[in-house]
C-alpha cells in the first residue's frame, strides 16, 4: 500500500504544480559521485519509465559506448511446483550479479518465455529481489534494471515496480490488450492508431504515477525510484527478506510458496490441459476489483446486495431481527476481507454481567459521529437528514469541507436542528468564516482522507448550484478545486499553529485532527497531541466516497485496526493518551465493530457509508457523475426529489448498533465504553476461522492486540511510566493558553483588546502589558459616537452599531502575539452572528474597531478577522497574515523611520491570506510564497509575490505592484488579478493550464475604476510610493497592467448578468419587497401547488428511443420501452416469434437506461437472476453496439434464459436497482434480442467437445428446459 505524507512532508498537487514534477530519469551505470569526468554523462535518458515495445527493442539491441544489454529469463518450470519459485528467484539474482561483473550496462528481466510449461516469476518479486541482491553486493549503481513483463498494467503496478528499483518497465500485455480492443472496436475512438492508443495509455499511466508520488511529497521519479514508500499487508518475513527488504509488514503472512501456488493456479487457467470450447473457460471473467461481482472467485467486498437489503430493512422497520440478519452477513463479509474478521472476543476469559448493568444505548450513541461528507458531494436533503438524526441522538454530524448555511445554525420549529456539531477545516477552506467556526462543538482539521489520502479533490462546475456556491463563498457554475493538505500544515509546527488559530476562533470547541492509518501514524499522532490537538481521528482505508480515484481507494492507507492500535499504544507509552480522545472509522457497521474498535483504543466511532445506506444509498459508485438515482450524491433537482431517507432511519440503525454493542459488553463483563477502551487483552485470533484458510496460517495478529502495558520495556521514562500505563482514555484538557481566567500578564493580547474596546466605549482607557507575550497596550479611545458604560463586549458592540460609533486601540506587538484579532472576531460572531462576516444582512461597518500596532507581528496576524475590524501594522508580519480573513481590513507597512526600499523587501510571510472569504489586505512590500491561495472574496494589494501566488483562487481581487514568482494563478478558477507589468514579461511567470483556463491580457475598460480605487486606498493606508507613481500618470500606466481573468468565472459573470437582466425584464416587480408588491396588488406569496398540478397533468414526455442516446443520464432521460407483442390476431395463426420485429435503436436507448451499478442486484443469485447472468455487462455492450461481445458475456453463464427468454418471469427486472425510483430496465427484451441477432448473424455455431467421456445422460423432454440442459452437457 502507498504511504503518504502526514505533517511530516507536505503532499504536492501534481496537476497545478506540475512545474516541479517529472518522470524523466537517467539510467544505466553511474560513476563516482565524488568526482567529475566526461564518462559521467554516459547514461541513457528516459523521458518516461514505461517503454513501448520499440523502445525496449532499442535497449535490448544496445551496443554503444561500451554499453550492452543482458536479457535474463524470468520464468520457471511450473511442473516443479510452488517451491520452484524461490529457486528461480535465486537464479535470476545470481545471473544478474554475473551480468554486472561481465560488464553489461543493462539487465532486462523478461517473462516473454512464458508457455504451458513455464510460468513467470511475479514481476514485482523479480525486480525487488534482483534490486536488493545487487544493492547488497554493491553492484546496483553499475547497471540499469528493466522489466519486460506481461503482468504490470495499472498505475499502482508501475509505482511498485519503480519504487522497488526498476529503471523502466515494458508492460507488453497491456499493449496486446489495446490491440485487441482496437481489433474488436471496443471503446476505441475512430481514427486512433495502435501507436496513438499506446501513447495515450503511457501518458495516462504517467499522470497516475505523478499523482501517487505527490501523496508523499515526492516530485521526481529519480527520488521515488527504489525509495520503497510502501507498507506490505499480509506479507511473510521470508518474502520480505528475499524480495522487499526493509518494508514494514506488521502482521506477517504469505510465504513465497503460497504465493507461487496462486500464480500456478492462474497459469493453469490460461494454459488449459485439454482442448476446450467452453466460453466460461475461454473468456476473461470480471474479477470485481472495483465494483461488486457475484461470480465465484471475485474480489470480496464488505457491501453486498444481501447486506445492503438487510441493513435497510432494519433501519426502516427498526427491526432487531433484520439487524441480526445483517450483522451475520456483515461478520461473514469482514471475515473474508478485514483484519478484525480474523479476531474474536475472549469470552471464555471473562465473567459476564447482566445487560442491565451496562450503560444504556442512549449513552453509547453519543460517541458516534458521521463522516465528513460535504454538502456539494451529497445533496442538501441527505446532509441535513444526517445532521438532524445525530442531533436527536446527542451525537455529532460533520459538515465535511463544503461549509454550512448559517440558517442551519438555528433551531427548527419542531425543536430539531440541522446544525452540524463538527465543522471541518480542510485544505479548500470552503465556507470557513468566523461565524462558521463559532458555531461548532468541534473543529476538525483534515490532514488526510481515508478514501484518498494525500489527495485533494474537485467539485465540478455542474454541481455548483447557487446554494452550494453561497455555502462555499464561490460562483455558481464554476468548478472548485480542493488542494492536497499542504499550505498551512506544511509541518507539525505549522499544524500546531493552525490548531492554535482554531482554538482562538472558538475556545469552546475541541480541535481535532484527522489522520489516516499507516505505519508510523502513532508517531505522527504523538506529535499532533503535543501540538495541542484535543481529539485525533484515525481513519481506515475502507469505505470512502465513490468519487475517489480507484488507485487511492484500492492502494492507499491501511485498515483502521492497525492504525488505532498503533496510535493508542504509542500515546500510552509516551504519556500522551490522557490528553486526547481517539476516534476511528473505516466501514464500521455493527456493534461488534464498535466493541472491537474500542478494545483497540477508540473512544469515539465514525460512520459514513453506513448511515447513507440506511437512508437509501445502494452503492452505485457513481458519486462523481451527479447521477445518484436515490438523490444522495447529486445536486440534480430531479434526482434529489427521489431521496426517500429520513433521520429516523439513521436513528434506528445507530440504536441497533449500540444495542448489539451492549450485548457484547455484557458478555465481556464491561459496564461502559471507557472501561472497554484499550482492553486488547479481551481480543484473540479466531483460530477456527484462520484454520479454514491455508493462506492465513502465518498471519500474526499479536502486534495488533498486544496491550500497551506489555510494551513497558520500550519506555525510557521510568519515573512516569507506571502512571502512563493506566491511562486509556482522555482525562485532562490540553492547555492552549487562551483561557479567560489567566492572570492579566499571561493573557493573550485579544483579551486586552476586548477590555480596551469596552472601556473605550465608556470613555475610559485600558492599558496592559504582556508578561509572556511582551505586548504593551497604550490604551483605547472612542473616536466617533457617544459614550456609554457597558458591562460586556456585546453591549458595547450593540451600542457602537446603533450610534455609528468607532473605537481606536493602540498597542505594540511581538512575534509572540500569534492569531491576533481572532478571539476578538470570535466574540463579535457570538454577538452579531453572520453580520461578523461580509455575508450577513447588515455587516458591521468598516473600521468600527481599529487597532494601531507597531512591531513584528506573530504568525496568523488577523486570522479570520471579522467585518468591522481593522488592524493597522507599522512593522512586518510573520506567516499566515490574514489567514481566513473574513471581512476585516489589514494594512502592513514598514516603520516610517526605515531607510530600505519597501517594494524590494518582504514584509509579510508565507501563505498569507490563505482561505480568505472577504475583507481587504494592503501590504507595502513583497508577500512571500503562496500568497492569496484559495482566496474566495478578499481584495488585496501587495508589491510583489513569491512562487505559487493566487493558487486555487475562486473570488476576490489580487493586485500585484511588482514581480511575481513562478506558477502564478495555478488552479485559479475565479476572481481577478492585476499585475503591474511595465516590461511586458510577467505572463511567462503565470500558469497556462487548460483547466481552469485563464485569459491574460490588457486591463478591461470596465475594470479601470475598480483597480484605480484599490491603488488609491493602498497608497492612502500604507504610503506606497509604487502606487503613488502609477497613479501620478494613470492614463499612461493603466495599459501596463496584465489582467488575469479565469475563463469560467468570466462566463459565469456574463451569464449571471444576462439572467438578472432577463429576470428584471420579465418581472418588473422582481426587486420590490413583499410590502411594495402588496401596494400594487401583486401577490407576494403565490400558490406553488397550482403550477405543480399543471405539470403533472402534462404526463411523461420522455422518449423510449433516440438516435444517439447518452449513458450518463439515460436512466432519467429515457422512458422504459418494452418490446411489444405482435397483435393477438396475427400471432395465433402461426408458431413464429411473438414479439414485434427487433428495434435496435430502441434497444440501444434502453441499454442506456442501465446504470451499470456498483453493486448490481439484478445478477445476484439471491436477489435477481438465479443463474447470475452478466446483465450490466451485456446491457453496456448493447448500448455501445457491440452485439457479438454482448453474446460472449451472455454465454458465460447457463444458457437457460436464451432458450426460455419468452417465458422467463425475469426476476432480474424485479431486482433492478432502477426499479427503486423508475420502471426497471428492459433486461428481458435486451437478452432475447442478443440471442436472436446472434442466430441471424451466424454467431451461434456447434461447439462439440474435442474429447468425450463416454458417459451418457438422458434428457427427458425436448422443450426449452431440455434443450438448455442438453447444450452444456455437450
Image: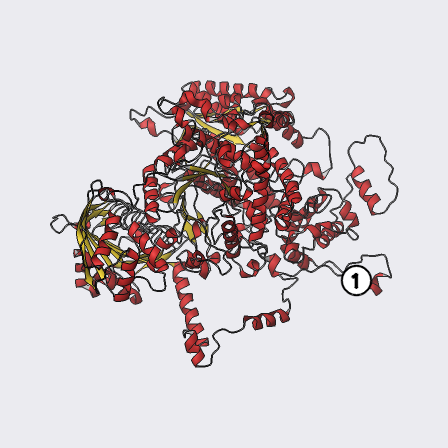
Q: Report whether 532 appears left or right of 747.
A: right
Q: Quarter-wise, where is residue 274 in the image? A: top right
Q: Position of residue 610 (x, y in %)?
A: 56, 45
Q: Position of residue 390 (x, y in %)?
A: 51, 49
Q: Report whether 296 appears left or right of 253.
A: right
Q: Is residue 825 visible?
A: yes
Q: Which residue is mark 1?
A: 1126
Question: What secondary structure is marked by label 1?
Answer: loop
Outermost residue, bottom direction? 1080
Residue located at (39% from left, 64% from top): 1053
Q: Position of residue 179 (x, y in %)?
A: 58, 42
Judging depth in this view, the residue of 947 and 268 nearest the camera is: 947
Q: Report whether 997 appears left or right of 1216.
A: left
Q: Position of residue 915 (x, y in %)?
A: 35, 51
Judging depth in this view, the residue of 683 and 66 nearest the camera is: 683
Residue located at (82% from left, 40% from top): 1270
Q: Quarter-wise, where is residue 492 in the image? A: top left
Judging depth in this view, the residue of 782 and 533 nearest the camera is: 782
Amino acid at each position: 500500500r502507498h504511504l503518504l505524507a502526514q505533517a511530516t512532508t507536505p503532499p504536492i498537487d501534481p496537476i497545478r504544480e506540475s512545474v516541479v514534477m517529472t518522470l524523466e530519469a537517467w539510467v544505466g551505470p553511474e560513476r563516482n559521485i565524488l568526482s567529475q569526468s566526461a564518462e559521467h554523462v554516459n547514461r541513457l535518458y528516459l523521458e518516461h519509465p514505461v517503454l513501448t515495445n520499440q523502445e525496449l527493442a532499442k535497449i535490448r539491441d544496445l551496443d554503444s559506448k561500451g554499453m550492452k544489454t543482458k536479457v535474463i529469463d524470468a520464468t520457471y518450470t511450473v511442473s516443479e511446483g510452488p517451491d520452484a519459485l524461490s529457486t528461480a528467484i535465486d537464479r535470476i539474482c545470481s545471473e544478474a550479479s554475473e551480468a554486472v561483473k561481465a560488464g553489461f550496462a543493462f539487465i532486462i528481466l523478461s517473462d516473454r518465455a512464458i508457455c504451458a510449461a513455464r510460468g513467470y516469476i511475479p514481476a514485482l518479486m523479480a525486480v525487488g529481489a534482483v534490486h536488493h541482491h545487487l544493492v547488497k553486493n554493491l553492484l546496483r549503481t553499475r547497471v540499469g534494471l528493466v522489466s519486460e513483463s506481461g503482468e504490470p498494467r495499472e498505475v499502482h503496478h508501475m509505482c511498485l515496480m519503480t519504487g522497488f528499483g526498476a529503471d523502466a518497465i515494458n508492460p507488453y500485455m497491456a499493449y496486446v490488450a489495446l490491440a485487441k480492443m482496437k481489433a474488436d472496436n471496443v471503446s476505441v475512438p475512430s481514427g486512433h492508431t495502435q501507436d496513438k492508443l499506446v501513447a495515450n495509455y503511457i501518458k495516462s499511466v504517467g499522470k497516475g504515477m505523478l499523482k501517487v508520488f505527490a501523496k508523499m511529497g515526492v516530485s521526481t521519479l529519480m527520488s521515488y525510484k527504489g525509495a520503497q514508500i510502501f507498507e506490505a499487508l499480509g506479507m511473510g518475513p521470508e518474502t520480505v527478506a528475499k524480495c522487499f527488504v526493509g518494508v514494514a509488514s506488521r502482521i506477517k503472512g504469505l510465504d513465497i510458496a503460497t504465493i507461487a501456488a496462486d500464480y500456478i493456479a492462474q497459469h493453469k487457467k490460461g494454459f488449459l490441459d485439454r482442448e476446450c470450447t467452453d466460453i466460461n473457460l475461454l473468456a476473461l471473467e470480471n474479477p470485481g476489483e472495483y465494483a461488486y461481482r457475484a461470480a465465484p472467485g471475485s474480489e470480496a467486498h464488505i457491501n453486498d446486495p444481501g447486506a445492503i437489503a438487510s441493513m435497510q430493512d432494519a433501519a426502516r422497520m427498526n427491526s432487531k431481527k433484520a439487524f441480526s440478519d445483517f450483522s451475520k452477513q456483515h461478520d461473514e463479509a469482514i471475515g473474508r476481507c478485514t483484519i478484525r474478521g480474523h479476531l474474536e472476543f475472549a469470552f471464555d476469559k471473562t465473567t459476564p454481567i447482566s445487560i442491565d448493568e451496562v450503560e444504556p444505548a442512549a449513552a453509547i450513541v453519543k460517541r458516534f459521529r458521521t463522516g465528513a461528507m460535504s454538502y456539494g458531494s451529497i445533496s442538501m436533503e441527505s446532509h441535513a437528514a444526517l445532521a438532524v438524526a445525530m442531533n436527536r441522538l446527542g451525537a455529532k454530524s460533520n459538515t465535511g469541507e463544503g461549509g454550512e448555511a448559517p440558517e442551519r445554525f438555528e433551531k427548527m420549529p419542531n425543536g430539531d436542528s440541522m446544525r452540524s456539531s463538527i465543522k471541518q477545516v480542510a485544505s479548500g477552506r470552503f465556507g470557513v468564516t468566523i461565524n462558521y467556526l463559532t458555531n461548532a462543538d468541534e473543529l476538525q482539521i483534515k490532514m488526510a482522507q481515508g478514501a484518498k489520502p494525500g489527495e485533494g479533490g474537485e467539485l465540478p462546475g455542474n454541481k455548483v448550484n447557487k446554494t452550494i456556491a453561497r455555502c462555499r463563498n464561490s460562483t455558481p457554475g464554476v468548478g472548485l478545486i480542493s488542494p492536497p493538505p499542504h499550505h498551512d500544515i506544511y509541518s507539525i509546527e505549522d499544524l500546531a499553529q493552525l490548531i492554535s488559530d482554531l482554538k482562538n476562533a472558538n475556545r469552546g470547541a475541541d480541535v481535532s485532527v484527522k489522520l489516516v492509518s499507516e505505519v508510523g501514524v502513532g508517531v505522527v499522532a504523538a506529535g499532533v497531541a503535543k501540538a495541542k490537538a484535543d481529539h485525533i481521528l484515525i481513519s481506515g482505508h475502507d469505505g470512502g466516497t465513490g468519487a475517489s480515484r480507484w488507485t487511492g481507494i484500492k492502494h492507499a492507507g491501511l485498515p483502521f485496526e492497525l492504525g488505532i492500535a498503533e496510535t493508542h499504544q504509542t500515546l500510552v507509552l509516551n504519556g500522551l493518551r490522557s490528553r486526547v480522545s481517539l476516534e476511528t472509522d473505516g466501514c464500521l457497521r455493527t456493534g461488534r465493530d464498535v466493541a472491537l474498535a474500542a478494545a483497540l483504543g477508540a473512544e469515539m466511532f465514525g460512520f459514513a457509508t453506513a448511515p447513507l445506506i440506511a437512508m437509501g444509498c445502494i452503492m452505485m459508485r457513481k458519486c462523481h457523475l451527479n447521477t445518484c438515482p436515490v438523490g444522495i450524491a447529486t445536486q440534480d433537482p430531479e434526482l434529489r426529489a427521489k431521496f426517500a431517507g429520513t433521520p429516523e432511519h439513521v436513528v434506528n440503525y445507530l440504536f441497533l448498533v449500540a444495542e448489539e454493542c451492549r450485548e457484547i459488553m455484557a458478555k465481556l463483563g464491561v459496564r461502559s465504553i471507557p472501561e472497554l477502551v484499550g482492553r486488547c487483552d479481551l481480543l484473540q485470533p479466531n483460530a477456527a476461522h484462520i484454520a479454514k484458510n491455508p493462506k492465513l496460517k502465518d498471519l500474526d495478529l499479536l502486534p495488533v492486540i498486544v496491550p500497551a502495558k506489555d510494551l513497558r520495556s520500550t519506555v525510557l521514562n521510568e519515573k512516569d511510566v507506571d502512571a502512563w500505563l493506566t491511562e486509556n482514555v482522555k482525562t485532562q484538557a490540553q492547555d492552549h493558553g487562551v483561557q479567560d481566567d489567566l492572570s492579566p500578564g499571561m493573557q493573550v493580547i485579544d483579551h486586552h483588546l476586548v477590555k480596551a474596546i469596552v472601556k473605550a466605549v465608556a470613555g475610559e482607557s485600558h492599558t496592559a502589558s504582556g508578561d509572556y507575550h511582551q505586548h504593551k497596550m497604550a490604551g483605547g479611545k472612542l473616536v466617533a459616537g457617544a459614550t456609554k458604560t457597558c458591562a460586556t463586549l456585546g453591549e458595547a458592540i450593540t451600542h457602537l452599531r446603533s450610534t455609528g460609533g468607532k473605537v481606536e486601540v493602540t498597542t505594540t506587538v511581538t512575534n509572540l502575539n500569534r492569531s491576533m484579532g481572532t478571539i476578538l472576531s470570535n466574540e463579535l460572531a457570538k454577538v452579531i452572528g453572520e453580520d461578523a462576516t461580509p455575508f450577513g444582512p447588515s455587516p458591521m461597518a468598516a473600521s468600527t474597531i481599529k487597532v494601531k500596532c507597531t512591531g513584528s507581528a506573530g504568525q496568523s496576524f488577523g486570522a479570520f478577522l471579522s467585518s468591522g475590524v481593522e488592524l493597522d501594522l507599522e512593522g512586518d508580519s510573520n506567516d499566515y497574515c490574514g489567514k481566513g480573513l473574513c471581512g476585516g481590513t489589514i494594512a502592513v507597512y514598514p516603520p516610517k523611520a526605515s531607510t530600505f526600499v519597501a517594494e524590494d523587501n518582504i514584509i509579510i510571510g508565507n501563505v498569507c491570506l490563505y482561505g480568505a472569504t472577504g475583507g481587504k489586505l494592503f501590504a507595502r512590500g513583497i508577500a512571500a510564497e503562496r500568497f492569496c491561495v484559495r482566496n474566495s472574496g478578499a481584495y488585496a494589494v501587495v508589491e510583489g509575490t513569491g512562487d505559487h501566488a493566487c493558487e486555487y483562487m475562486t473570488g476576490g481581487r489580487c493586485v500585484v505592484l511588482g514581480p511575481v514568482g513562478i506558477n502564478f494563478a495555478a488552479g485559479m478558477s475565479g476572481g481577478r488579478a492585476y499585475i503591474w507589468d511595465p516590461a511586458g514579461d510577467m505572463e511567462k511567470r503565470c500558469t497556462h493550464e487548460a483547466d481552469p483556463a485563464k485569459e491574460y491580457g490588457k486591463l478591461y475598460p470596465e475594470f479601470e475604476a475598480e483597480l484605480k480605487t484599490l491603488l488609491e486606498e493602498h497608497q492612502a493606508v500604507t504610503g506606497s510610493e509604487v502606487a503613488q507613481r502609477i497613479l501620478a500618470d494613470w492614463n499612461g500606466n493603466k495599459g501596463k497592467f496584465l489582467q488575469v481573468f479565469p475563463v469560467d468565472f468570466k462566463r459565469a459573470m456574463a451569464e449571471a448578468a444576462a439572467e438578472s437582466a432577463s429576470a428584471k425584464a420579465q418581472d418588473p416587480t422582481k426587486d420590490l419587497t413583499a410590502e411594495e408588491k402588496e401596494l400594487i396588488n401583486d401577490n407576494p406569496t403565490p400558490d406553488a401547488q397550482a403550477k405543480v398540478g399543471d405539470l403533472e397533468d402534462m404526463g411523461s414526455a420522455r422518449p423510449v428511443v433516440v438516435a444517439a442516446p447518452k449513458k450518463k443520464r439515460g436512466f432519467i432521460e429515457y422512458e422504459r420501452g418494452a418490446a411489444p407483442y405482435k397483435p393477438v390476431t396475427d400471432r395465433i395463426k402461426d408458431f413464429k416469434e411473438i414479439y414485434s420485429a427487433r428495434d435496435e435503436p430502441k434497444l440501444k436507448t434502453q441499454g442506456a437506461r442501465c446504470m451499470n451499478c456498483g453493486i448490481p442486484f439484478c445478477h445476484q443469485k439471491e436477489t435477481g437472476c438465479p443463474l447470475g447472468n452478466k446483465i450490466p455487462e451485456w446491457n453496456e455492450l448493447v448500448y455501445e453496439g457491440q452485439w457479438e461481445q454482448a453474446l460472449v458475456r451472455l454465454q458465460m453463464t447457463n444458457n437457460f434464459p436464451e432458450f426460455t427468454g419468452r417465458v422467463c418471469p425475469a426476476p432480474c427486472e424485479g431486482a433492478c436497482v432502477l426499479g427503486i425510483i423508475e420502471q426497471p430496465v428492459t433486461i428481458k427484451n435486451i437478452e432475447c434480442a442478443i440471442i436472436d441477432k446472434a442466430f441471424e448473424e451466424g454467431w451461434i455455431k456447434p461447439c462439440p467437445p474435442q474429447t468425450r467421456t463416454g458417459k451418457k445422460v438422458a434428457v427427458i423432454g425436448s422443450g426449452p428446459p431440455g434443450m438448455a440442459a442438453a447444450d452444456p452437457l455437450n
